[in-house]
Amino acid sequence: MKARFLFPSIFRILGILMAIPGFILGYLVVFKEYKIPDFVLHLRDHASLDRAEYENFTNELALALVVVGLVFIAFSKVKREDELTARIRLNALYWAILTNYIIYAIWFLMSGSAELFHWEMMSSALSGPLHFSLNNFFLPLSIFIGRFYFLLNKSKNEYVEAPVHFLPNRPYGLIGKALTLILLLPAIYALFDFFGANWLDAVYYFLPLAMLLWIYSKERVEDEYINSIKLSSMQIAIYVNYVVLLLANFFCYGILFLLVQQLNLITIPLIFLIRFQYLLYKLRSQDSRGGATLSCL
């Protein structure tokens, strides 16, 4: 199993030089409402309800520095790129996405409880700086980096297999698939129905957890090659997710960017499932014809 889609090792240093000032600037923007003086563009002739005539790009700069920096740190080659490193990278991706959505599940339950029992202080905190959609911009990459370099450093002293564990295909995989397919259409409707019922919003917020159950369940046949497909699919999902996020960061404003924030809750698992299932379908089609393994990984 080999990891692909990696940047040259020099990009890791560049990523550190971008991420650290990005986090500092982001902290100042979120908690101190800081804006770089005169860092503005005149984008419109007239202001509207959700769009200002002049846009200050301090927030966009901070997010871009953090995201690009973390991507470079996370997916730059290390000195030893071998089978073990690929396994460690898969393990780190596995735990990063899983931990990220466990945190999401906790936030989801706490937000629902705060709204149900009218805990205004908790509700205010969870809808402000602690809102998951805000932290979701950088949390998966941060967890991945911490886990990956921890295991990489540990493997210098001892051989670490770094296995990953998935739930049995039956019943968890089947339940995850069924829930995802059932919830997908009403969740998409809820996303664009700004004045809809609260239960539709709950459906949308529950969708990532259903998708997670599907992702973290075994296939009927699970081997090293399937794991390599999962690794490449997760990397592609993260790349595409953050490319879309960066484009939205600079070209979407107001309500449109809030929509992107909501979409960001499901983009990584959704892109992963689309690519992984597509490659799995091609693999099975080739196997049924007696063909070779996939060459598009």
Image (cartoon, rainbow, N blue to C red):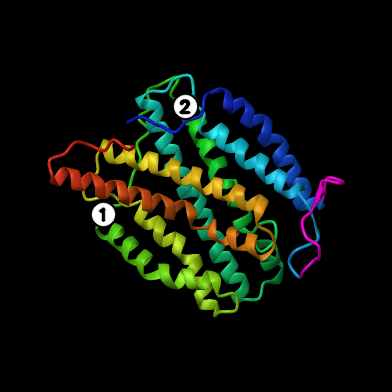
Q: Is residue 262 left or right of residue 4?
A: right
Q: Is residue 244 above or below residue 195?
A: above
Q: Is residue 191 above or below residue 264?
A: below
Q: Nearer the viewer, residue 8 or 21?
A: 8
Q: CA distance from mark 1 to mark 2?
A: 30 Å
Q: Amino acid at mark 2?
A: Leu
Residue shown at 47%/47% (left/top)? Answer: 97
Decide if residue 118 is in sight here.
Answer: yes
In the rendered view of the protein, which quadrant contains the N terminus? top left
**Circle 1 is placed at which residue position?**
169
Q: Amino acid at mark 1?
A: Asn
At mark 2, the secondary structure is helix
**Circle 2 is placed at which residue position?**
152
Q: Is residue 250 left or right of residue 204?
A: right
| Residue 175 forms part of the magenta stretch | no
Decide if residue 221 is in sight here.
Answer: no
Residue shown at 79%/62% (left/top)? Answer: 52
Q: Is residue 164 left or right of residue 29?
A: left
Q: Main SS of the magenta segment? A: loop
Residue shown at 49%/23% (left/top)? Answer: 78
Q: Locate residue 48, reporting x and y percent.
A: 77, 69
Q: Which residues are magenta?
A: 34-48
At mark 1, the secondary structure is helix
